[in-house]
Amino acid sequence: MSVTDFPIVFSAEPDTVFRHFRITTSTSGAIASRGNNRGFGTVTRTGTGTYKLPLDKNFFELLGFNSSVEGATVTSGKGERCRIVSQTLSGATPNVVFECRAADGTVADVTDGHAIFGFLALKASSV
C-alpha cells in the first residue's frame, strides 16, 4: 500500500492575521510563563480560569478562536476547554478575554503546571 501526501488547502479572508499563544499555569491558575505570544501584550489572569489577551493593534473582526489545554492528565473539576467571553477589537486597549471550563461547565482554572495553547484569526481591515 502506498502513502499519498495530500496538500493542505486553505482559503482565508483577505487581510487575515493569525495570533497564537501559550500560557503555562502555576498554583491556582496563576500564569507561570508565557511563550509564543507574538502579537499580544502581557497576558493577565483576571479571575478564576479567565485570561485577558491584549492585542498589539486594532482589528476589524474576530474570525476564529481555538485552544487546547495540554498536560499529563486532566484533573476532575479543572478547566479543560476555553471559550471567548468578550472582545474589544478597536480603541485604546484592544483585547480578547477567554475563560476555561471544567467538564461540568463551570468556570475553572486548568490543572497546575498545564499549558493553554491557542490561536486567534483576526481580520485586519474591512476589505
Image (cartoon, rainbow, N blue to C red):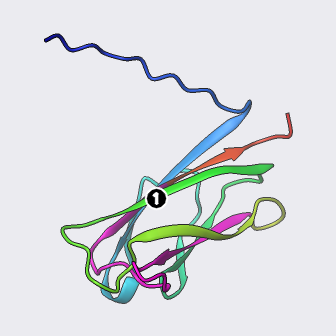
The percent coordinates of residue 93 (x first, y second) are 75, 68
The segment highlighted magenta reads: 94-118
Dividing the image into 4 quarters, which one contains the N terminus? top left
Residue farthest front in this picture: 1
Q: Which of the 4 image quadrants contains residue 98?
A: bottom right
Dividing the image into 4 quarters, which one contains the C terminus? top right
Provide the residue designation for mark 1. 67
Q: Which of 124 and 111 is in front in this view?
A: 111
Q: Which residue is drawn at 21% across and 14% down?
A: 3
Residue 101 is covered by the magenta coloring: yes
Q: Nearer the viewer, residue 71 or 74?
A: 74
Q: Which residue is drawn at 43% across and 53% down?
A: 36
The percent coordinates of residue 109 (x first, y second) are 41, 83
Q: Which of the 4 image quadrants contains residue 55?
A: bottom right
The percent coordinates of residue 9 (x first, y second) are 51, 22
Q: Residue at x 31, y 87 (%)?
A: 27
Left or right, 51 with respect to 6, comes to right
Question: Mark 1 belongs to which amino acid?
Answer: Ser
Q: Residue at x 81, y 49 (%)?
A: 60
The percent coordinates of residue 34 (x first, y second) are 41, 65
